Image (spheres, rainbow, N blue to C red):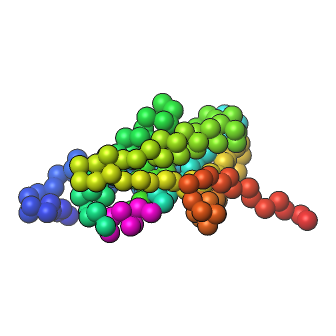
Amino acid sequence: MRLWRRDNGDLDTADAARIAMYDDTTGLASRYLFFDRLGLALARTERRNSWAAVLLVDLDGFAKVAERAGDSTADEALREVSDRLMTVIRPGDSAARVGEGQFAVLCEEIDGEPDAISIAERVAAALAFPFELEEAQVHLSASVGIALAGGRDADAEALIRGAAAAMRSAREHGGARFEVFHPPSGGD
């Protein structure tokens, strides 16, 4: 199979792997790489009987910024968001761009919900300051959904669904906040 670049040049295997693993705009991990890292993290969580968390970060109003200011300003904002994310997450945590204005953070070896909340608060605070971009000043906030997994039987898809549900709840409650997903308890 032969792959092609937009400039009609050949795309070598290393370029193809980089494109599959990393987001072109931000340089962060891609959705694919994030899910791979999540699977490995959950296996370690089970072996070590420890906790991990996924934070899904939705940029409130990002679509309007892209619509009003244009693609280049939106891309610049995404790069700035990724830079700010990387300054507030812990060494060893993973950040990825998983959607147009959505990011994910994988936190391993945490001490349960309080640690995850602390990281979410740092993320929200970092994104609350205006972005001084070349073409415009942009104000963004974030709706953050948190889901935790600990010990045995951790399921990556269920964790992502939980974080997505918590993120939607944060957005529905006005945005610029975080919510923690608590699975329904069985056996009522």
> Range of the magenta residues?
61-67
Among the 4 quarters of the image, the one containing residue 4 = bottom left
- Vertical arrangement, residue 96 with respect to residue 89, above or below: below
Image position of 179 (left or right of 136):
right
| Camera-side residue of 20 and 27 | 27
Residue 157: x and y, percent?
59, 60
Q: Please name the residue shown 74% across and 58% down the image.
A: 183
| In the image, residue 66 lies in the stretch drawn in magenta | yes
Q: How many marks?
A: 0
Among the 4 quarters of the image, the one containing residue 140 = bottom left
Name the outermost residue toward the top.
91
* Main SS of residues in magenta: helix
Residue 58: x and y, percent?
49, 58
Image position of 15 (left or right of 122):
left
| Camera-side residue of 49 and 110 | 110
| In the image, residue 108 lies in the stretch drawn in magenta | no
Q: Please name the residue shown 41% across and 61% down the image.
A: 62
Residue 25 can be seen in this image: no
The C terminus: image quadrant: bottom right
Residue 84: x and y, percent?
41, 40
- Vertical arrangement, residue 161 with respect to residue 93, above or below: below
Image position of 80 (left or right of 120):
left
The N terminus: image quadrant: bottom left
Q: Please name the residue shown 78% across and 62% down the image.
A: 184
Residue 16: x and y, percent?
24, 54
Residue 171 can be seen in this image: yes
Among the 4 quarters of the image, the one containing residue 68 = bottom left
